[in-house]
Image: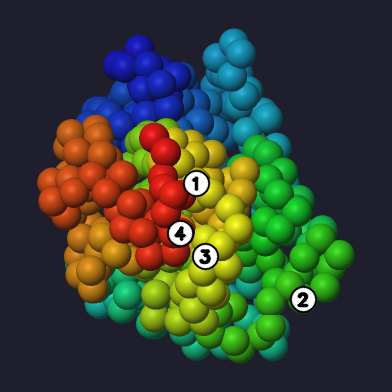
């Protein structure tokens, strides 16, 4: 029992660990090592409120954690930091009998249009994933300092890049309305601003829906392109920018290779995000249900390349070639 849970956690299979926990007998669930392992898994799935009670029980029973892993006390310290910097619960959004979005935030002029759009977010999630789409918790911040403290406590790392104002991951979106200079980074009320939040919601939906191993399995271009597709109703301006940018790039540079799009997208985010967004726009062909179908197929076969070909009839290189043919003239072409 304990070995199975520990093995799942050590391999990063935190959804599998939680499923194993719920299959245990009630007496087994109270074992302090089991409580630690399940609390550890919930922390990696960004559910600190669920993890807290389990970790307190483990600590009270004297179980301090596994060697080389975060200790029970360290995990509880991170939860304490999250609670310190977390905004208050602002609102819950139900879909039928189930709360699908809950928002922790202080209401600001920047946030008001995003809150108005939350029902549209849920409609988009339902359109793509069906009625059983994942429930996601949003945390919005109106100061950069608070955001960065909370981010470190929640994810165990600092925000990755200077332009990194938000993220979506398993079960959670964290977003700051202010940049590194503590100035409003995106104009309030603009559709693209709301689209950027929906983009991060797309990351949370896709990763939570797929489950264990998503970010290690999905190619960079598909990871970013799928969530641009989720945000498509708010992204007319962004897709226009993508097309203009690539029209200019096609006159003066070589296109990215497929390997770069799969593994090195973030080294040239402006151009490669644009290519990714247009690749996925092409392969979806106005059929948003293909997002779920690709994720379902990839989860079964453990291959996004096979999933793309199964659902669309063509592999990823084909879809890169489609975009390159539109924006880069011969003799340029995508390399392998």
CB under 8 Å between discs 4 and 2: no
Residue at mark 3 to residue at mark 2: CA–CA distance: 28 Å
- Residue 256's tag is 1
Residue in the image at 69% along x and 77% along y: 186
Q: Which residue is mark 2?
A: 184
Q: Position of residue 293 (x, y in %)?
A: 18, 54
Q: Position of residue 151 (x, y in %)?
A: 67, 50
Residue in the image at 65% along x and 38% along y: 156
Residue in the image at 57% along x and 34% along y: 56
Q: Is residue 174 left or right of residue 45?
A: right
The first of marks 1 and 2 along the sequence is 2
CB under 8 Å between discs 4 and 1: no
Q: Which residue is mark 3?
A: 246
Q: Nearer the viewer, residue 60 or 119?
A: 119
Q: How many numbered circles does the render carry?
A: 4
* Circle 4: element type: loop
Q: Is residue 111 left or right of residue 138?
A: right
Label 1: few (<14), some (14–19) or many (≥20) C-alpha neighbours in 10 Å: many
């Amino acid at each position: 029992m304990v070995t199975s849970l520990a093995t799942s956690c050590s391999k990063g299979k935190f959804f599998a660990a939680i499923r194993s926990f719920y299959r245990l007998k009630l007496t087994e669930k109270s074992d302090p090592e089991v409580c630690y392992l399940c609390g550890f898994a919930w922390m990696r799935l960004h559910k600190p409120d669920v993890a807290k009670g389990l970790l307190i029980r483990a600590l009270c029973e004297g179980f301090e954690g596994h060697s080389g892993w975060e200790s029970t006390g360290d995990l509880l310290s991170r939860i304490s930091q999250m609670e310190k910097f977390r905004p208050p619960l602002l609102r819950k959004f139900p879909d039928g009998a189930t709360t699908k979005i809950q928002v922790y935030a202080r209401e600001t002029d920047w946030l008001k249009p995003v809150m108005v759009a939350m029902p549209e977010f849920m409609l988009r999630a339902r359109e793509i994933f069906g009625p059983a789409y994942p429930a996601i918790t949003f945390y919005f911040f109106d100061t950069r300092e608070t955001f960065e403290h909370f981010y470190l406590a929640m994810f165990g790392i600092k925000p990755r890049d200077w332009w990194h104002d938000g993220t979506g991951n398993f079960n959670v979106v964290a977003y700051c309305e202010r940049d590194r200079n503590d100035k409003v980074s995106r104009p309030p009320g603009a559709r693209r601003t709301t689209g950027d939040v929906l983009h991060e919601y797309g990351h949370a939906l896709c990763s939570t829906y797929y489950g264990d191993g998503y970010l290690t399995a999905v190619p960079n271009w598909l990871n970013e392109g799928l969530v641009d597709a989720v945000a498509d109703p708010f992204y007319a301006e962004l897709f226009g920018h993508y097309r203009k940018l690539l029209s200019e790039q096609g006159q003066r540079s070589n296109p990215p290779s497929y390997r770069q799009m799969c593994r090195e997208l973030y080294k040239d985010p402006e151009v490669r995000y644009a290519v990714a967004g247009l690749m996925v726009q092409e392969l979806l062909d106005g059929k948003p249900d293909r997002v779920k179908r690709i994720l379902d197929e990839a989860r079964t076969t453990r291959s996004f390349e096979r999933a793309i070909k199964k659902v669309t009839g063509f592999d990823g290189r084909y879809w890169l070639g489609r975009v390159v043919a539109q924006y880069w003239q011969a003799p340029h072409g995508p390399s392998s």
